[in-house]
Image (cartoon, helix red, strand yellow):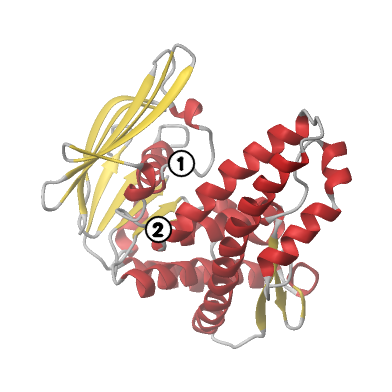
Amino acid sequence: MSLTQLSLTNFRSYGERTVPLDASVTLVVGPNATGKTNLLESLFVLATTKSFRAKDTELIGHGQEFYRIVAKQDDNTELAMAYQVKSGSAEKRVHHGKTPKSLIDHLGTIRVVLFEPNDSLLIYGGPDRRRRYLDFVLTQTDKHYAKSLNLYRRTLQQRNHLLADWGGNTAELFAWNIQLAQAAAEIDERRRAVVGHINGLAVESYRIIAGSAEPLELTYHGTAAAADYAASFLKLLEAGLSRDIAAGFTTIGPHRDDFSANFKDAPIASVASRGEIRTVVLALKMAELAYIQDHTGSKPLLLLDDVFSELDDSRRQHLLDTLGNYQAVVTTTNADISSELGARHAIIYTTEPHHG
């Protein structure tokens, strides 16, 4: 299933805008600060229910109370998301045609893989960036994971409320601990599995892109040992109670976990050149793409936000070759990239092109 049209209302810089989407590649061309990334971001928001760079309230056009994103599929079904802030309360709604859907049931309807200049933060950035990478992959391919993550976050919020205003209610805390440990165990199991799977895919992608095989090993660092995780995590929560009370929040758990990358048998940032790191990051994104396709049987929508200027010729060519196999939306300041695309494509301008 591919998307044929995107319509925006009060989203970022767009008051009203409808654009066609090509079944192959849609190039979005324009100078910086003319709304290219905003358009691409709206597709990511519709697919994943959240932005990769901002809070929901920041996506609403200036002076407005809501935004709306509508994408039409090639069977003419409309997928719509609206977010509204009114009287201090916020509400996000999704519809498939005229049928309302919960956010969790909507996840996976459109699957996306985003390539953007900040992808290097998968290596250089903090743990939250790497957790988000895993969560975006898993929530798009595993509804059970999305539900476990949602339950974990709600339970964590309740436990943190109790800790922030601690009154000694150990019975209520124990009940939250049990629920938190069960949800954490499911999250940990699936994250470890996806890290293992993506590791194998990334090693192969690196070999293809770089033309040479290098040892690359991703390791997930969970709060507790994978064996008997729930019981071990529960003990850690109980042992760390005084620390959590002092902090006023839960200091351990999947919301603090991380994964690391070893390259040539050492921490990647200490041994890899800049070019090698860019190749590893591209390999990780290609692995994300392959994982989603392998686990769903359908091809995700590729979103490329001004990434070609960051790549050398070989990595650029690899990405260009990949585009021909997927529906993609590509932002660029330079329309000349059109001549490099072997795939059929259409061009959208954010401003009127100048000729002559």
Q: Give the Cα separation between the discs numbered 1 and 2.
A: 16 Å
Residue 353 position in % (x across, y down): 29, 36
Asked whether 343 or 180 is in front, the reply is 180
Q: Quadrant of residue 243?
A: top right
In the image, residue 272 above or below residue 337: below
Q: Is residue 221 left or right of residue 239?
A: left
- Residue 252 drawn above or below residue 100: below
How many dots with numbers? 2
**Residue 52 point in image, percent of width and height:** 51, 44
In this orientation, does residue 310 appear? no
- The quadrant in which residue 37 appears is top left
- The image shows residue 188 at horizontal and vertical percentages of 61, 65
- In this view of the protein, which residue sits in the foreground, 24 or 50? 50
Residue designated by label 2: 143
Residue situated in front as seen by the camera: 101 or 292:
101
Work out which residue is located at the far left of the displayed protein and give it. 75
Q: Amino acid at mark 2?
A: Lys
The residue pinned by badge 1 equals 50
Label 1: how many residues lie within 10 Å, few (<14), some (14-19) or many (20+)?
some
For marks 1 and 2, the one nearer the N-term is 1
Residue drawn at x 21%, y 62% is: 344
